[in-house]
Amino acid sequence: MKLKTIALCGAFALAATSTATAAELSRRPFGQTPSGEAVEAFTLTNAKGVSATVITYGATLQSLIAPDKAGKKADIVLGFNDAATYVKNASYFGATVGRFANRIGKGRFELDGKPYQLALNNNGVAALHGGVKGFDKVVWRVLEAKPGPIASVTLGYVSPDGDQGYPGTVNATATYALDEQNQLTITYGATTDKPTIVNMTNHALFNVAGEGAPEGAMGNVLTLPADGYTPVDNELIPTGAITPVAGTAFDFRAPTAVGKRIRDASDPQLVVGKGYDHNYVLNGKSSGAPRLAARLADPKSGRVLEILSDQPGIQFYSGNFLDGSWIGKSGKLYRQGDGIALEPQHFPDAPNKRQFAPVRLDPGQTYRNVMVFKVGVAQ
């Protein structure tokens, strides 16, 4: 029997079927950090040919294997084959980023009237993805690993009070779970012992044509169910406005190739971002059940990736700063436009923009971010 589910922009069929019902889990060494910390890899595999590999360094999604319409499998996530290369690279490929994903202008914010200065690790003008040593640059502890019917691994990290300038000791968790519906669900959680701010996400760079595909990812067709986005200043910090996407190069409400308008120099936002590097305001209610946040499709292979999210926004980054300096898993150079990040999260610089949804976390509360990466093929 062929299983189907209806996507935003047409039919979406899960890849091959099987009588097996339990997803498998395997565990292996993945090298070590320069200080000698061991890094492990966990691979979750279901009966339909989909698998995801997670490494403990940065609680990173190292691989996501998906079949195409002919059953041919390909890795659709950019990354590397060993821990040492992840440590050397600063591009956040597949990493869990936090405490605060994205940018905070000048690295400053106030909480209960007290100012905080964070590490400035983005050209000296902003705090980016948690700081110089954020969640992406530490080895996470393995809290639990189990096979199907939904195979999963849960990792944990304790960020001490004052880490990178943030207040409060934060206990963070990252759970990756793969089911037989070809859904990889990432659930982030955090608690704190004093008021702080938290905004975690995953920074995977996708190419549904396949990692290392010679044509890059600019032919990937993107759909974003968002009527507005948050424009940025020259330092890529949101101005605080929410601008309608209608009539602009930022309108992806209908399926559009990522590269179609990316070099439109008449749009100053594309100029300042060197392409797309902007937060979209997702339609529909946040903080509830995950709803469709993005759809990425490759016309040639038929591969489709749907991203569901319970967050208010999603950062769309078109790989503008990939410059050929790094060799990926397939032995190919990663160039500008070879991968696309779609990061469900709260808005950038939210601690300094009262009109944005709050990112405060108090003792007794639990931060939560649930995102679902669902792979299949178009009909």
Image: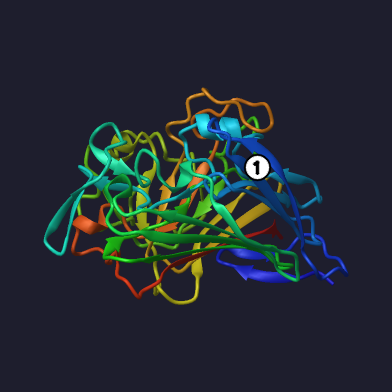
- Considering every residue shown, the one lying at the far left of the view is 113
In the picture, measured across the screen, residue 19 lies left or right of residue 371, that is right
The x, y position of residue 56, in whole percent, is 59, 48
Q: Nearer the viewer, residue 183 or 366?
A: 366
The x, y position of residue 194, in whole percent, is 28, 65
Determine the image quadrant of residue 112. Answer: bottom left
- Considering every residue shown, the one lying at the far right of the view is 19
Q: What residue do we see at 61% from left, 35% from top?
A: 32
The x, y position of residue 30, in whole percent, is 67, 39
Q: What residue do we see at 28% from left, 31% from top?
A: 123
Q: What residue do we see at 25% from left, 63% from top?
A: 356
Q: Is residue 285 above or below residue 91?
A: below
In the picture, measured across the screen, residue 278 lies left or right of residue 112, that is right
Determine the image quadrant of residue 34. Answer: top right
Amino acid type indicated by mark 1: Ala
Q: Nearer the viewer, residue 285 or 163?
A: 163
Q: How many marks?
A: 1
The residue beneath circle 1 is 209
From the image, which quarter does the C terminus lie in? bottom right
Q: What residue do we see at 19% from left, 51% from top?
A: 116
Q: Is residue 119 above or below residue 327?
A: below
Note whether residue 64 is visible.
Answer: no
Determine the image quadrant of residue 347. Answer: bottom left
